């Protein structure tokens, strides 16, 4: 019978609705999804394992640790150093974010709200709230792997006018004073990472409205090209992300400056879901499309059932619900969050930097 089906997500965007809930960008998810293709330390066979392995199976990633190479100035057979490498392994854990809803079509027989409309609202709200939870997980991973040291702020400050960049080793936060938060901020950040031997393409995610100045500069000069945006290190607007799941804490912004490839996310689909198992009215499947807000394919379970649902209405006397049919959908986002190996964050700088924009 079930009207609920994973394919409902396919035409989700075609539904026009009015819903009081307010929806905002999930910039941390967007940043991680855009970073994932650059995770070149994850091979295609490992990606397949991420997609299919049971949570009880560990996925070990081999790595050769940074080598202290011996170099001498005396040639000869007796002076050839061993220079042996040391290998290690590290692994990742799967995260689970789970929600769903139940839907009783008969409830709408005497209801001014359309059944399909209400179902779509619930789908939207569920996906949005799951995305909030996912962002909390991703922010935790960024926080755990953020750099604990960052040199050369003194040198960068020479080119930023009255701007000041300072790394606080006590909080592991790079603070950027108000004067430094102008059009050249990204250039200074890129130069700082180059100096710390971590060059590359970077993106950022910060608390809401934290990049107002930078986005204005990019829009103001980008199209007319009256200013050399590349010369001042302006990153693409697509790489400037906001998230309401990062608190400004009375600062201009809090957030992260992240090299593309420094974090990634791969979905996991248990056996019955990826094999589309069907048992009576119960169906297991994987969504055909990336779910809204979540930004990944999810595991979808649907089933229909019989129930006395009179308790759903205040009077408890609606005869439509005495012997009624209901449907349920479970939405299960299961995923691995990956990051490059770092043998010691206290001595080796990371390409994930926690940043904070000061108000003075």
Image (spheres, helix red, strand yellow):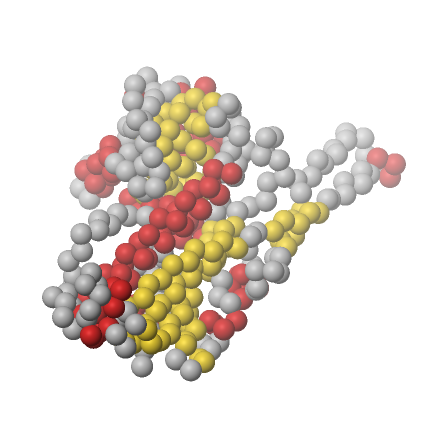
Q: Is residue 99 above or below residue 69?
A: below
- Which quadrant would the N terminus be assigned to in this image? bottom left
Q: Nearer the viewer, residue 355 or 219?
A: 355
Q: Position of residue 301 (x, y in %)?
A: 40, 70
The residue depicted at 49 percent of the width and 36 percent of the height is 146
The residue depicted at 43 percent of the width and 33 percent of the height is 354
Q: Is residue 288 visible?
A: no
Q: Residue furthest right?
A: 78
Residue 128 occupies quadrant: bottom left
- Which quadrant would the C terminus be assigned to in this image? top left
Residue 166 occupies quadrant: top left
Q: Is residue 48 above or below residue 197?
A: below
Q: Nearer the viewer, residue 226 or 192?
A: 192
Q: Is residue 108 above or below residue 144?
A: below
The residue depicted at 45 percent of the width and 28 percent of the height is 173
Q: Nearer the viewer, residue 306 or 80?
A: 306
Q: Is residue 278 above or below residue 287?
A: below
């Amino acid at each position: 019978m079930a009207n609920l089906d994973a394919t409902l997500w396919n035409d989700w965007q075609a539904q026009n609705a009015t819903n009081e809930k307010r929806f905002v960008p999930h910039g941390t998810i967007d940043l991680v999804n855009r970073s994932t293709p650059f995770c070149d330390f994850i091979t295609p066979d490992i990606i397949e394992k991420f997609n299919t392995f049971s949570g009880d199976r560990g996925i070990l990633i081999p790595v050769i640790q940074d080598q202290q190479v011996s170099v001498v100035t005396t040639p000869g057979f007796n002076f050839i150093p061993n220079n042996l490498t040391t290998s290690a392994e590290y692994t990742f854990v799967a995260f689970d974010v789970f929600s769903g809803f139940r839907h009783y079509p008969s409830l709408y027989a005497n209801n001014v709200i359309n059944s399909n409309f209400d179902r779509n609202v619930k789908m939207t709200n569920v996906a949005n709230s799951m995305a909030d939870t996912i962002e909390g997980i991703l922010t935790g991973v960024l926080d755990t792997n953020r750099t604990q040291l960052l040199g050369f702020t003194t040198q960068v400050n020479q080119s930023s006018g009255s701007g000041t960049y300072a790394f606080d080793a006590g909080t592991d936060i790079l603070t950027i004073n108000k004067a430094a938060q102008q059009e050249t901020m990204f250039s200074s950040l890129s130069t700082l990472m180059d100096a710390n031997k971590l060059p590359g393409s970077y993106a950022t995610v910060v608390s809401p409205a934290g990049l107002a100045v930078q986005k204005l500069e990019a829009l103001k000069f980008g199209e007319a090209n009256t200013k050399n945006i590349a010369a001042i290190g302006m990153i693409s607007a697509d790489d400037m992300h906001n998230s309401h799941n990062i608190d400004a804490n009375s600062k201009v912004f809090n957030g992260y400056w992240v090299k593309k490839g420094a974090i990634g996310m791969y979905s996991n689909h248990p056996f019955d879901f990826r094999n589309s198992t069907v048992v009576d009215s119960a169906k297991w499947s994987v969504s055909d499309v990336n779910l809204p807000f979540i930004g990944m394919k999810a595991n979808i379970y649907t089933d229909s059932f019989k129930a006395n649902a009179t308790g759903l209405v205040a009077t408890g006397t609606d005869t439509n619900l005495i012997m009624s049919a209901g449907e349920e959908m479970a939405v299960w986002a299961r995923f691995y969050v990956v990051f490059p190996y770092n043998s010691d964050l206290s001595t080796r700088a990371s390409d994930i930097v926690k940043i904070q924009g000061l108000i003075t």
